[in-house]
Every structure is written in structure tokens, then in C-alpha cells.
Amino acid sequence: MGDHPKLPIAHGIIHTTHRPWHHPLGVGAKFVNTPIEQYAVNGTQARIQCNVAGDDVTIEWLKNGAVIKENWKYSTENEGQILIITMYYARDSGVYQCRWNQDSKHGILDIRVTTYERPAILRFDPVKTAFEGQDLEMKCIANGKPAPSVRFYKMTDDKVGIQSDYYNDTKNGSLILYDVRVSDAGWYLCEAEGLSHFDKDSRMIHIDVMGKPKIYLIKEEVAKSGENVTLQCQFHGDGRFYARWIKNDEIKAQKVFSASNKTQSLNLTLTNVGYEDMGVYQCEVSNDAGTVANSTLLYVNVPPTIINKAHRNFFVVPPTNVTLSCGAVAYPVPTWNWYFSNETTTKLDLKNSTYVKITVTENGGSKLNISGFLADRLGNYTCEARNANGNDSAIISLIKKVPPSVPSLKCSVGKTTDSLLCVDNNALNGTTVDSPRSYIVYYVEEKASASSADCCSNGTTLKNCLADRQNVTNNLGHLWIYNMKPTMKYILQVVAENEAGESEVSECIWVATAASTSTPLSLVAIILYVIAVVALILLIDLLCCLERGKGMFAALYRRYYRRSNDQTLPTDYVEESQSGQNPIIEEQEVVYESNVVRTGSNSALKSPVL
């Protein structure tokens, strides 16, 4: 509801405000600053204003196309620029026309006169409850003519406070508070104002704000290994609370608290703490307004414990660059030292060595970078972690890698008909100085040529023949060879390889893949095929029987029908026939035609339709 020009109310008359004007000489007539919407109070004198500038101008008023004449009800002032309605009633509202005349020219302006209605607040929210951090809308709906302007003010010390940009006063008579704060609680004034600053209606609205919980600062804790520790989370706020302690997304403690004006707390007690208890603990508290959280750190003083402390062997091929690493569980973060020893050197401190570089990793571990590693640097390297609570160490041995030994193979059929499985007995012991990294498998079909076996005699190998080859990864001494032909005999030779080089070629091995399990047509399929053919033949024969009276079914029916219709004459009837009397039944001739059985002259028997 926007702002409107104010009409001062005095002695029951509404005056329309306008800027001063004058009649410049020689100027043509025109309307100047005349409101086209004017208001009058019911039961009072109304003054309708029409500002016209110009020389020798006459003004007249019209309503409904008829000129208004001065009488007891209508009169004019200021050379006709003000039309006075002695006693205005609602029925007098409508469109009035102000017309100026100057020589042969004239101008007309429509002025709508509306009955003024004082502002009245029709609907508002006397009490509103908001949650901290959310948006709140307060409605204050007012009515009037013209539409009143609505404003909200926050009351401070019983006085109207200045409206801030923080509050959004919309045109539909509502106030939106964005991201409500606890300080927004209190009394607000909703005010609807008409044309006069003195013509108002107002209501008071109270806002209650439920704040989110407030958590006090939680101090960090430092404990020794084996001690008991209690973490305390203190908080206060409005309403009921749900509080919990969390570490690594795991709830360690939780509790529901009743509403209270006092400070409340949730304690988490940890017994016999160790390194695994060290870390970030988060206290989380919720109420209807939302959730807040605060975190703290628990440090546990523990001596270093090397991770993966077991003696480790690394196989290398000099010269090369080598990086060794050690990690430890410890607090405070340990300092690291590295030492070297072999058959001729005893615990050489590498801190000032020119060919190594010691670094500390992000997680508190250490790395030893050895550049240009040579054979004389083979031996034992010791990493040592030390802090105020103790120390720990581990040994890493660097051993020269050598080429693999000749594979000792045993081969058999694989899991599928196109695969073979070979086991290298020399590589079953895990990681050793000569452990193969992979294998090269050479193979030929035994029946490929009569000379296939010659590749394994007189010093000749498949490696030198035109043999196929596959590179196979060492899987703990197991070699899986694929893409072979089913039911095929092969001759194999294998070479093992690692970072140091290749082995000699193995002995020739004769092995066959599994037979194919598929057959052209199974017994069940054959039986089903025969049954289908027989059923088809019977179906065709039955159709021929029904349509034409031919076929196997028709012959069977005729034979059955003849037997079922044979008649045996009585004995006395036969004797009469033999005595010379004419028999009643003569010999019958049966003729089959068009599926109907027709008899001789003395028979009336007919066969049914087939």
C-alpha cells in the first residue's frame, strides 16, 4: 500500500494540496497539478479542486455530461477552480469534469471523487513465535479509501524506534524479518495511516524468539596413556535439549534434557585412554530452533610404536634410487633417526650422509631417500622414532635382486577348455631374491608339424622355433594360460623374468587341454524332435480323415464300424428261411461315398458321418 498525497482535515473539510500556480500573461490555458483522484468525507463539506493556468480563462464544472449550476448545494471559489459541495454524501461520488474555456479553445479533465474511508486494521498477529536463524513474516492487513500506507516499528523504551533495512516492509501489509536473531524479540507497532498524519489505526504485536542452544568453550585435554579422562560440554538455551558426544561419526554419549534456565552439561568419560582415543570430539546440542556444535581435542601422551615393525626385506637392482619409509603411533610427534649397518659397518648415523635425504611425512612418519644406490650400500637400515615418552625402531634390509632360477613346472588342464594351469615349484616360497615377476610362455601344437618335437632336442628350444608366446603374471607361482584350443596337445617351454633379468628356458612339457563338453545334438533333443515329427504326421492324417474320409484314421474307423454293426439272426428265423419262406433281410451291399454309408434295397441303415 503505497504513499498518497496528504489531505489535511480541518472543520470537517478535506483540502487537496497542490503546488502554487499563477497566470502568466499571454499563456494558453492548461491544467496544473490537479489530482485526478480526490476524496470527500461523508456528511461534511467537500472541496474539489481544479488548477488551471492561463489568461482570460473561464472554468465550469460538469457531472454526467451536465453543467453544474451554483445553488444551495453547489458553489465555487477562486474563479471556479474549487467546486464546493455544501453537504457531501456517498451518493455524490463519481466522475466530475473540470472544463476551461479560452477563446474558441477548451480543455476537459476527469476528476474521480470517492467517499473517504478512514484506515482500519482488519487482521493482524498479536503474538508471533520465531526460531533463531529462520525468517519470520508478520501480517497487518488494513482497509480504507484511499488504501492506507502500513508501517512497522520496533518499540524501544516505550518509544517508536527507527525502522532498519533489516526489516522488509512489503506493500501487502506484512513485515518479513530475515535470519531472525534473539535480539529481535519484543514489541512491534503496526500502523495504518490515511491521507492525514492524524488519521491512523494501529496495533501492537509481540514477537517471541526461541534461540538456538549456546555451547560454552570446551578446553582441550592432554592425558597420559592409561589414565581416565572426562570431557565436559556445558550449554544453555530455550526449551528441551538433545545433546550428544561424537567422534568419527560414532556417538559416544547422548542424553535428553528438560527445559531449564540453568546451565546444563553432558559429560563423556573415557577410561584407560590410549592412542586410539586421541582425536577430535564434537559436542552437538539441539532444540526446536536448531542444532549447534563445538569441538575439542584430546591428546594422549604415548611412546612411539613403529607401524609394521616386522623385519622387512626389499630387493633392489643396483644402481638405482631407493626410498624407504617408516611410520609410528606416537604423541607428541616423534623425531626420527636413520642408521646403516652391514658386514663391515656398525650403526652408521645417516643424518649427515651425502647420498641420503631424510624427510618427515604429513602423518608424522619418515622417509629415507637414497640416490644412486650402489652395491656397497646393501645392508640393514634402521629407522628410530623417539619422543619424551620413549622410543621404538625397525629394520629394513636391502638385498640385491638376481635373475630367477629355471622354472620347475607341473602343468594340467585349467578351469575352462581353453586354458592350462602350470605351477612353478621354485616360486612357491613367496618373495625371494630371485622371485619371478612374470613369465614368458612359448607353445606349439604337437600335431602342427612332424618336426614339433625337434624343437625340444639337440639344444633347440621353442624360443628359437616359430612358436606362439604369452606373457603371464606370476600369481604366487601359478601360471594361468588362456586362449588355447580345446582337446589339443601342446608342447610348452617357459622363461621366468624379474627386474634383474631372465632365467634359462625350462624343459619341454607336453600337456593337453580339456575336451569340449558340447555335442551336436543331445539325446533329449533327438527324442523331442522325433516326438514332434510323429505328432505332426498324426495331425495331418486326422485332418485328412475329417475332410476327405481318407488316411489311417479313416481306415481304422471303417474297420471298427463294420465289426460293431454285424448282426446275429435268431434260430427260429433261420429255420423259417431254410423252409422256403422269403427272408426278411437280403444280402446287403455297402457302398462308401461322401462320408455316408448307403445300403442295398431292403436296408434302411446308414452310417454316421465320419
Image: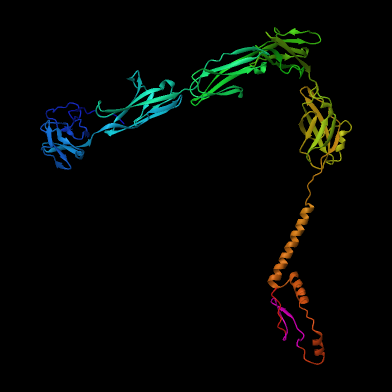
x then y, percent, for residue 429: 82, 25
For the image, the number of numbered tags is 0
Q: Which residue sits at x=83%, y=32%?
A: 493
Q: Main secondary structure of the magenta part?
A: loop
Closer-to-camera residue (257/74): 257
Q: Is residue 289 left or right of residue 306?
A: left
Where does the N terminus fall, quadrant-wise?
top left
Q: Is residue 163 left or right of residue 14?
A: right
The picture quadrant where one finds residue 454 is top right
Q: Is residue 431 above or below residue 526?
A: above
x then y, percent, for residue 575: 82, 88
Q: Is residue 340 above or below residue 480?
A: above
Asked if residue 422 shows in the view, the reply is: yes
Residue extending furthest toward the bottom: 580
Q: Magenta stretch?
A: 584-602
Where does the C terminus fall, quadrant-wise?
bottom right
- Would you say residue 413 sits in the magenta stretch? no
Q: Is residue 524 above or below residue 94?
A: below
x then y, percent, for residue 128: 41, 28
